[in-house]
């Protein structure tokens, strides 16, 4: 007698990293970040349709940003809490209320780790590939070494194409799956 196979869906999460106005069209924006918006929206819709969970990280700084260590290294005011540049950008913002949001003070978010402990698959998208996307991907792969951590290259961008490609290569070397190329 054959036992029917049971299909078990694995819990999946999408993390939209810092798709905020300052990183898209604002003080640190780029045409590459603008170009991925429709891909991120499509990805969010697919996750919501398949009962996947969606999380948003928000780079969040105070008015004293330029006096911080990060501000000394990246001396461009951005994502000051409460300003228009701090908000999730464009069409992506329509979905923020259907997910969970975590604010972070720097590149990676330790705060998101506890939110993702039940997920077997974690996918990241957003900006910038070579800074916040890679930082969060590494943190999540470190916290959950047996989970599948994925980055869709169509849904991430950087202001610097060379650093974008290098970041994707580094993520691959750390067992983070890069798709969509």
Image (tube, rainbow, N blue to C red):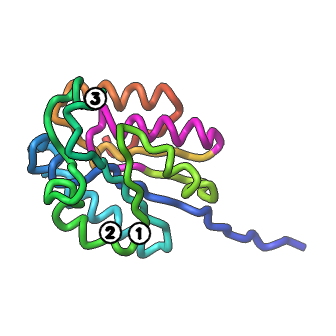
Q: Mark on residue 50?
A: none
Q: Which is the main secondary structure of the residues drawn in magenta?
A: helix
Q: Quadrant of residue 134?
A: top left
Residue 176 falls within the magenta-colored stretch: no
Locate residue 9, reporting x and y percent.
Answer: 62, 67
- The residue beneath circle 3 is 165
Q: Is residue 119 above or below residue 5?
A: above
Q: Check disc 1 and report the residue beneath it.
A: 99
Q: Residues within 10 Å of mark 2 (few under 14, many from 20)?
A: some
SS label for mark 3? helix
Would residue 136 be found to the left or right of residue 62 on screen?
A: right
Give me the residue at 21% from left, 50% from top. Answer: 80
Residue in view at x 29 percent, y 65 percent: 42
Residue 165 x %, y %:
28, 29
Pinpoint residue 65: horizontal percent, then vertical percent.
Answer: 23, 38
Residue 77 seen in this snapshot: yes
Range covered by the magenta-colored residues = 124-146
Give the vertical position of 46 relative to 39 (above or below): below
Image quadrant in which the N terminus is located: bottom right
How many angstroms separate mark 3 from mark 1 (CA)? 29 Å
Q: Residue at x 45, y 30 (%)?
A: 172
Labels 2 and 3: the sequence-earlier one: 2
Residue closest to the eye, 87 or 12: 87
Q: Which mark is residue 96?
A: 2
Q: Marks 2 and 3, Cα distance to the nearest angstrom?
A: 28 Å
- Contact between labelled residues 1 and 3, with CB atoms less than 8 Å apart: no
Q: How many numbered markers are drawn?
A: 3
């Amino acid at each position: 007698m054959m036992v029917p196979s049971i299909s078990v869906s694995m819990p999946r999460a999408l993390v939209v990293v810092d798709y905020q106005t300052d990183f898209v069209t604002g003080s640190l924006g780029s045409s590459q970040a603008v170009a991925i918006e429709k891909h991120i929206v499509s990805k969010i819709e697919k996750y919501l349709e398949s009962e996947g969970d969606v999380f948003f990280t928000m780079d969040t700084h105070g008015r004293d940003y330029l006096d911080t260590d990060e501000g000394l290294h990246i001396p461009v005011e951005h994502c000051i809490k409460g300003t228009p540049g701090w908000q999730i950008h464009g069409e992506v913002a329509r979905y923020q209320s259907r997910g969970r949001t975590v604010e972070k003070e720097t590149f990676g978010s330790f705060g998101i780790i506890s939110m993702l402990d039940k997920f077997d698959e974690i996918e990241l998208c957003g900006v910038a590939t070579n800074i916040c996307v890679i930082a969060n991907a590494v943190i999540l792969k470190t916290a959950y070494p047996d989970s599948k951590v994925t980055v869709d290259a169509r849904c991430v961008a950087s202001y610097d194409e060379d650093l974008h490609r290098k970041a994707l290569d580094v993520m691959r070397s750390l067992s983070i799956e890069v798709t969509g190329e």
